[in-house]
């Protein structure tokens, strides 16, 4: 899905799956990640091995895909 890009400083991506994980046979076991940032501040907290690093890396990749015009692997129309 190619996201809608606007002039707002918010990001709304729902059910994003890392493209490499989406291509694997065990993609049924992958938990999609949601991200909604209403402004420019982000704080992620949680237990060790809770998925914080994977989430940040996935959304960094998502941001690059949006800049390059590459479709991203989501189940709903995102807005950036």
Image (cartoon, grey):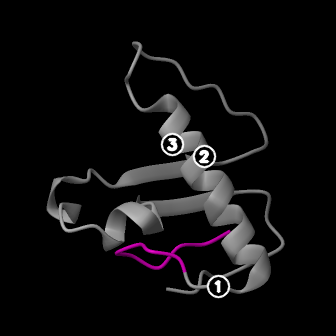
Report the side of 10 relative to 50 (left or right): right
The secondary element bearing badge 2 is classed as: helix
Q: Is the magenta stretch mostly helix, strand or loop?
A: loop
Q: Earlier in the sequence, mark 2 or mark 1?
A: 2
Please provide percent x and percent y for residue 79.
61, 72
Task: Name the residue rendered at 38%, 21% in the picture.
Answer: 49
Above or below — where is 47 with respect to 25? Answer: above
Determine the CA span between mark 2 and mark 1: 17 Å
Q: Earlier in the sequence, mark 1 or mark 3?
A: 3
Which quarter of the picture shows residue 24? bottom left
18 or 77: which is nearer to us?
A: 18
Contact? badges 2 and 3 (CB < 8 Å): yes
Quadrant assignment for the C terminus: bottom right
Task: Name the residue rendered at 73%, 67% in the picture.
Answer: 64
64 or 75: which is nearer to us?
A: 64
Q: Say which residue label 1 marks.
A: 70
Task: Name the residue rendered at 77%, 81% in the picture.
Answer: 68
The secondary element bearing badge 3 is classed as: helix
Q: Say which residue label 2 marks.
A: 57
The secondary element bearing badge 1 is classed as: loop
Q: Residue furthest right?
A: 7
Q: In the image, which residues are magenta?
A: 72-80
Q: How crowded is mark 1: few (under 14 residues within 10 Å), some or many (20 or more)?
A: some
Report the side of 69 relative to 34 (left or right): right
Task: Name the residue rendered at 53%, 76% in the picture.
Answer: 72
* Residue 47 highlighted magenta (yes or no): no
Contact? badges 1 and 3 (CB < 8 Å): no
Q: Which residue lies furthest to the front in this view?
A: 25
Please provide percent x and percent y for residue 9.
79, 57
Q: Say which residue label 3 marks.
A: 55
């Amino acid at each position: 899905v190619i996201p809608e890009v606007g002039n707002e400083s918010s990001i709304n991506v729902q059910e994003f799956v890392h493209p490499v994980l989406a291509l694997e046979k065990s993609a049924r076991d992958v938990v999609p990640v949601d991200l909604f940032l209403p402004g420019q501040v982000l704080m992620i907290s949680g237990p060790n091995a809770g998925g914080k690093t994977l989430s940040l890396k996935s959304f960094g990749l998502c941001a690059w895909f949006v800049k390059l015009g590459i479709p991203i692997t989501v189940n709903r129309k995102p807005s950036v």
